[in-house]
Amino acid sequence: RPFSHRCDAEITSLTTMKPDLGRDILVAVKNNTKTPWKSTLTFYVAKFAILRLLALVYLVAFLGAFYQNRGLMGKHGLQPASYHMERLRNTTPKDSQLELLRGFLSHPTIFWWIDITDSRQDTLVGVGALLSSFVLLGIDSWLLQLMLWLLYFSIVTIAGGTSFYSYGWESQILETGFLAIFLCDLPQ
């Protein structure tokens, strides 16, 4: 009896928020089927947890890049990323924006359009950390997720000529980050 009283109270509170939902829940309970509000609630809780935890992983990855990239891939670093980017640019003609787009599709990085410098790498990492913080605070959109994915992919791509970003977790972050774009509401 206490369980049914609790269910009645939940249904009553949901009914006041959305009258049609309460009717649907009553019909579902009567027919002994899965309640629609329970699966919706589960989705939003899972979405909340996944996006916040992924934002935390992005934040740690961007902060790690901020503290390490100058020494590893900077102009005077162990293996400068500018050499790798220059090799990529030499294999792709720069005659038109279409050629740059083809280069971007084969090696995604924003550094196809801007020259790679230490300060621009730091700016990229700083923007990534800031956007990660926004998602941690609850601002989530498909555009933020896409930007986080692209910024981190830019770091991994310019490090392609080095051994610093060739571990499995970079690709795991990128795969999970790409899928997280579709967890957010896409524009209609």
Image (spheres, grey):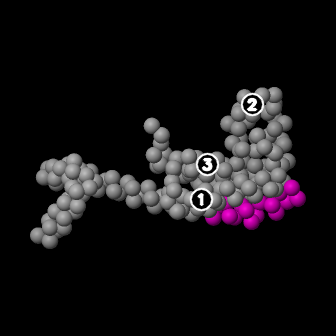
Residue 149 in the image, given as x and y percentages of width and height: 61, 49
Task: For residue 46, say whether it is visible.
Answer: yes
Residue 121 vs residue 17: left or right?
right
Amino acid type at mark 1: Ser
Magenta span contains residue 67: yes
Q: Which residue is mark 1?
A: 132
Residue 121, image x, y percentages? 76, 54
Relative depth, front residue between 10 and 99: 10
Q: Is residue 55 left or right of residue 129?
A: left
Query: Camera-side residue: 88 or 29?
Result: 29
Q: Earlier in the sequence, mark 1 or mark 3?
A: 1
Q: Which residues are magenta?
A: 60-78
Q: Residue at x 63, y 64 (%)?
A: 60
Whole-number angstrom distance, CA of label 1 to CA of label 3: 10 Å
Q: Give the overall secondary structure of the magenta segment.
A: helix
**From this viewpoint, which residue is outermost toward the front?**
16
* Residue 119 forms part of the magenta stretch: no
Of label 1 and label 2, which has the lower sequence position? 2
Q: Is residue 58 visible?
A: no
Disc on res. 147? 3
Report the quarter where the C terminus lies. Answer: top left
**Which residue carries the number 2 mark?**
97
**Dots 3 and 2: beta carbons under 8 Å?**
no
Label located before the other in sequence (3 or 2) = 2
Horizontal relation, residue 127 to residue 54: left or right: right
